[in-house]
Amino acid sequence: MSNGSITVPRLQQPPKNGGSYVIPQLEGEIISIPGSKSVFRVLTSSLQTGGAMSVFSSGGVLADAPGFHHHNEAHDIFIVTKGYMKIWNGDRCKILGPGDFASVPPGVIHNPQILGPHSESFGVITPGDWLDFFRYIGETYDGILFPEFDSRNLLQILIPKVKAAAGKYDVVFHPEHQGCAVSDWSSDDEVMPETTQPYYLRANTGPRWILGGVISRPFITTRQCDGKFAISSIESSSVHSETCPFRRKLTFPRTHHCFAVQEGVLEVTVGDASPYRVAEGESIFVPASTPFQLGFSSKFVRVWSFTTGDGVEALIHQAGSPFEGYVIPDKSKVWEERNLLDACQKFAVRVS
C-alpha cells in the first residue's frame, strides 16, 4: 500500500544521489554545443544508471552537422518526435520524420544533422559515460528551447577541443569521409534485424505485441544491441485499467527504467510512495531493484520506455501475443496471469 507522506521528487535536473525522480517538460541537465543551434536535455546518465546508459531529448534548428565520426564502444540511437533529421548511418542516409528511428552500433561511421525549422528527438548513448564528451565540448543553457541564433562556427570550436582531448573520449572523426546520397524508405526499413547492425525503422512499422490492453512497439530490443538496452513505445488506455497487467508491483533487479510520456498521463507508483501522474512531455526514472507499478490514466497513453536491459517491454513480448492491429483495441485481449508470472521468472523479475 502506498504511503501518502512519501512522494517521488520533481526535479529540474537528474540528482547526483540516485533514487527515482520526475523531470518536467523541456527540463533536464541542458547542454548546448556552441554553434550547433541546439540543446541536449539529459534525463538520466551514468550517475543514475551506474554507467549503463544516458537518455536525453534534443531540440534545435537547421545548422551544420558535427561531422562524420564513429565510436569504438558507444551505441547511438535517434528517434524523431518533431520536424526532421538527416542521419548518415554507415553506407546509407535517410531523412527521419516523427516516429522514425535509427540505430548506430559501435564502429559505424555516422553523422546526424538537425533540419529546420524546429526539430525534436530522443537519443540514447550506451555506455552512459560517453555523455561526458557533450559536457566537455558544450556549455550550460538556461533558455526556453535552444539558442536559435548562435552563429558561432561549430567546427572551429569543436575540432580544437577534440584534438586537445585526443584519446580521452570515445569519438573518432573522419574529416575525409564522403557521405552517401539520401535514399528513399523501403520495405527493408519496416523490419528489425535479428542481430546488432545499423538499421532504420520507419514510424509505425516493425513488430507489435499485446498483453491485455497494453501494446508494445519496440524500436530496439536487447537482440539488436548485444544486450545493452531496449526502447519501446508502450501504449494503453484507462478504459483497460481493470485488466492492466502491471497493477502488481514489479522489481527488476538489474534493469533501470526511464519512462518518457509522449501522449496522455501515465500513473507510476514507486515503492511505498504515493502514485505519481506523469503527464505528456515529462519523464520518470525508476532505478533497478526498486518496485513499481504502472497505470494508464487517460483515454490514450503512449510512453517510450528506455531500459538498461530487458524491461517491461520484454514481459509484454514474452507473456503476450503478436498484434496485427495498429491502435489500442476497444476490448482488452484475454491474457493468462500464469504467462506473466512465467515471463517474470524468466527475466528474474520479482512480483508483489
Image: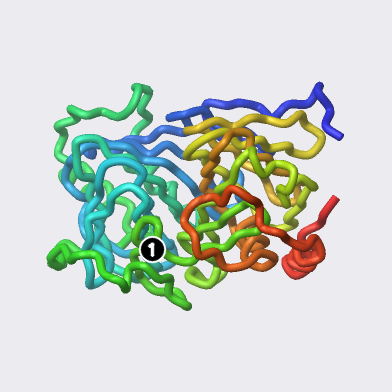
> To which quarter of the image does residue 157 belong?
top left
Task: State the residue lying farthest toward the front.
Answer: 330
Mark 1 neighbour density, 10 Å: few (under 14) some (14–19) many (20 or more): many
What residue appears at the point 25 percent right and 35 percent down from the top-left corner? Answer: 118
The secondary element bearing badge 1 is classed as strand
Q: Nearer the viewer, residue 311 or 337?
A: 337
Q: Which residue is mark 1?
A: 103
Q: Quadrant of residue 95?
A: bottom left
Report the residue that reaches farthest toward the bottom. Answer: 194
Residue 77 versus residue 220: which sits nearer the camera? 220
Question: Is residue 259 found left or right of 2 in the rendered image?
Answer: left
- What residue lies at 68% left-to-right and 40% top-to-bottom? 295
Q: How many marks?
A: 1
Q: Residue at x 68, y 37 (%)?
A: 268
Side of 159 where 309 appears, left or right: right
How far across and down, in percent of the image, does residue 338 sit? Answer: 81, 65
* Colouring scheme, one of rainbow, by chain, secondary structure, one colour: rainbow
In which image quadrant can residue 150 be found?
top left
Q: Is residue 173 visible?
A: no
Is 154 situated left or right of 141 in this image? Answer: left
In this orientation, which residue lies closer to the viewer: 105 or 71? 105
Residue 248 visible: yes
**Looking at the figure, which quarter contains the N terminus?**
top right
| Above or below 276: residue 160 | below
* Residue type at numbered disc 1: Ser
Q: Position of residue 64 (x, y in %)?
A: 16, 45
Residue drawn at the location 39% of the way across and 74% of the way down: 197
Image coords of residue 169 (percent x, y): 39, 56
Residue toward you, 21 or 323: 323
